[in-house]
Amino acid sequence: MVTMSRATEDYLKTIYQLATRGEPVTTGVLAAALGVSSPSVSAMVKRLEDGELVARPDNRTLRLTESGEQAALRVVRRHRLLETFLAHVLDVPWDEVHAEAELLEHALSDRLEERIDTALGHPTHDPHGDPIPPRHGRHEEKWGASLETTAAGSRFVVDRVSDRDSAALRHLGELGVRPGVVIDVDEQAPFGGPRWVRIEGARHPLGTPLTRLVHGRVVNP
């Protein structure tokens, strides 16, 4: 039996996030994502394997077991509820809620989690458009197409904006890029230049580091 320490929860949540983004989950990738050494990752992964929370489908990659995924989803739920509470009740900027929720998610009791959920009206998505896992039942973690790959001339509805880079998130927010916003994709500048888009009538250049953070769907003009 593995003790659900802060470190254990961070590992399970990170493995879940990497896997649902379609990224390969290896010890090297996990070390980089968590900012720890490879030997530390190997030691923790061994404990998670012994506790039947993580398995190895091959020699390189890792995956969560059913019990590991359930544990990860509990952390993800607390994290996203906290982000929503901080943004909507305390008016914390959307580029700051992630870091604050990282600190609070490990100390949140089940009772307080449910009180927050009820007070917020049982939200289904956090401020970045990430779906909040339900207390019970199935959860689907979908990432739509990225703005980076959207063809010129398209109308693009933003569903999710990655919160992995707070500075980029702040800039996108200042431009009006948020879930539900419609973006008109004008053109892609040649030779690796920016993608020109229109947001609420204003024209902006967005480089690849920004467009790959924005996910959604193309709609008819």
Image (cartoon, rainbow, N blue to C red):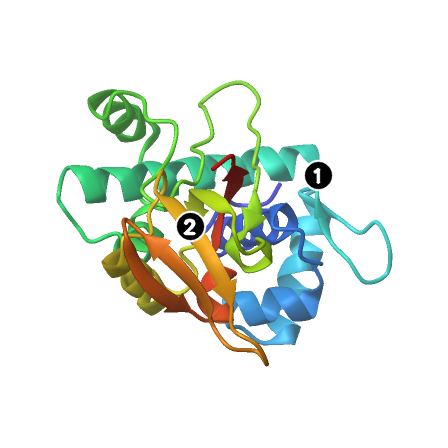
Q: Which residue is mark 1?
A: 65
Q: Is residue 83 left or right of residue 69?
A: left
User: Mark 2 is on which residue type?
Assistant: Asp
Tell me if mark 1 has few (under 14), some (14-19) or many (20+) residues whose alpha carbon lies within 10 angstroms of its own: some
Q: Is residue 43 above or below residue 11?
A: below
User: Mark 1 is on which residue type?
Assistant: Thr
Q: Quadrant of the N terminus?
A: top right
Check whether the beta carbons of the residues at disc 1 and disc 2 lie within 8 A of each other: no
Q: Mark 1 vs mark 2: which is more N-terminal? A: 1
Residue drawn 52% across the image and 48% down it: 13
Residue drawn 46% across the image and 71% down it: 207
Q: Is residue 121 above or below residue 3?
A: above
Residue 200: percent from left, percent from top: 27, 48
Q: Which residue is mark 2?
A: 184
Residue 95 in view here: no
SS category of the residue bearing label 1: loop
Residue drawn 60% across the image and 57% down it: 149
